[in-house]
Image (spheres, helix red, strand yellow):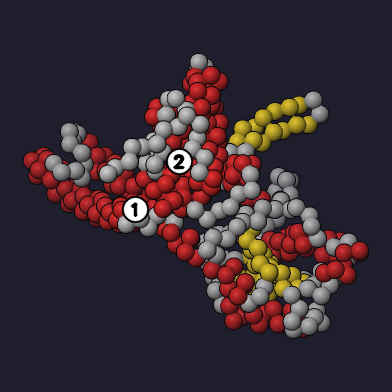
Amino acid sequence: MSIFHETVVQDQAAAIQADLYMSFELSDKKWQLTLSDGRRGPGRYSVEAGDTVAVAQCIAKAKERCKLQAQSKVHSCYEAGRDGWWLHRWLVEQDIDNIVVDSASIEVNRHARRAKTDRLDGDKLLTMLLRHRTGERVWSVLHEPSAEDEDARRAHRELARLAKERTAHTNRISSLLVLHNLRPHVIIGGRDWGRWCERHCGQVPPALRAEIERESARLALVKQQAKALEAARRQELAAGKQPLVAHLAQLRAIGPKGAWILVKELFGWRRFSNRRELAGCLGLAPTPYASGDSQIEQGISKAGNKRARALLVELAWGWLRLQPDSALTQWFNRRFAAGGKRMRRIGIVALARRLAIALWRYLEHGEIPNGAVLKPTTA
């Protein structure tokens, strides 16, 4: 008996026998499609990456092989990756019930060595899709942002990449100068950098100087692009096009940059039923380990949005300094302030979780965090 017959129990077979199930194993050049109706063994097809016409043809062939009607419902899945959401949106347009799966939530064999091929991965995804359709909770399904919300995340993510590039260029220039015992007393790439370089870079060999000049040119381009993005963001805020960002930035300790990231990554398009869902999305949920008499808390899961999580930890430190009379700060001071560095680091993560919940309630229901102060309004 095949693994697909084992997956679907007899009393559930009648409920799914009229549907077709499909998994995608995506790569840059080829896609592996695995299809079955839950009763027969899987049919496997290989198509060129991005060839949606070939995908539609494979679905038609699979329906004919499984003796399904042309209008039979199709359920599909694929792992989140480089292809993003365009494939999901195309499948939905074709009236295909598709889900995008968090790859980290897919169960694996825990033996020291396990076989891994596109064919085995496709079979595994199809098996888990069948289990998912019968109501079993087997993985984490990602929520789709709208095309507009997805595009709105581009600006601040590009700014983050540009900041890393800027640091890489300045570090490289500094390292090249140290080769000849030159240690700039000005900011590399700053206003006084050109004059300093003209005065001192004549001491280095010509090839090295040319390399420093090229690095400086790349650094100047990165800074120019970052300034353009930041100016565009300020213009949108000034024009009132980002009301949620402006509302969040009214809280002291929350600046426009942090408010922008939290809204675009978290609060602007995601909907949470309760605080636990919010904490789980951020990876700030606990991960207990309880087996027999062993009771261990393994810390936070870190399974959520890493950009928002890192920002909230940073904002939590600022909250302690700029909102000293708030209930959140007082709670932290009672529980963790008197401890050592380790206890304060643990406490700041707990504060970040509570701060996220407080900010969510502030945006959703207008509840100002207890004891928090708003920035003075400008005339």
Determine which of the numbered discs, if any, sits on residue 45 in the image: none
Q: Which residue is mark 2?
A: 311
- Residue type at mark 2: give it: Leu
Q: Nearer the viewer, mark 1 or mark 2?
A: 1
- The quarter of the picture where residue 13 lies is bottom right
**Quick one: SS at disc 2?**
helix
Picture coordinates of residue 250, whole percent (x, y)? 39, 41
Q: Is 341 on the left or on the right of 164, as rendered?
A: right
Q: Closer to the N terminus: mark 1 or mark 2?
A: 1
- What residue do we see at 69% from left, 33% from top? 288
Picture coordinates of residue 26, whole percent (x, y)? 59, 66
Q: Nearer the viewer, residue 89 or 291?
A: 89
- What residue do we see at 87% from left, 64% from top? 12
Above-or-below relation of 329 to 69? above
Number of numbered labels in the structure image = 2
**Quick one: SS at disc 1?**
helix
- What residue do we see at 70% from left, 48% from top? 113
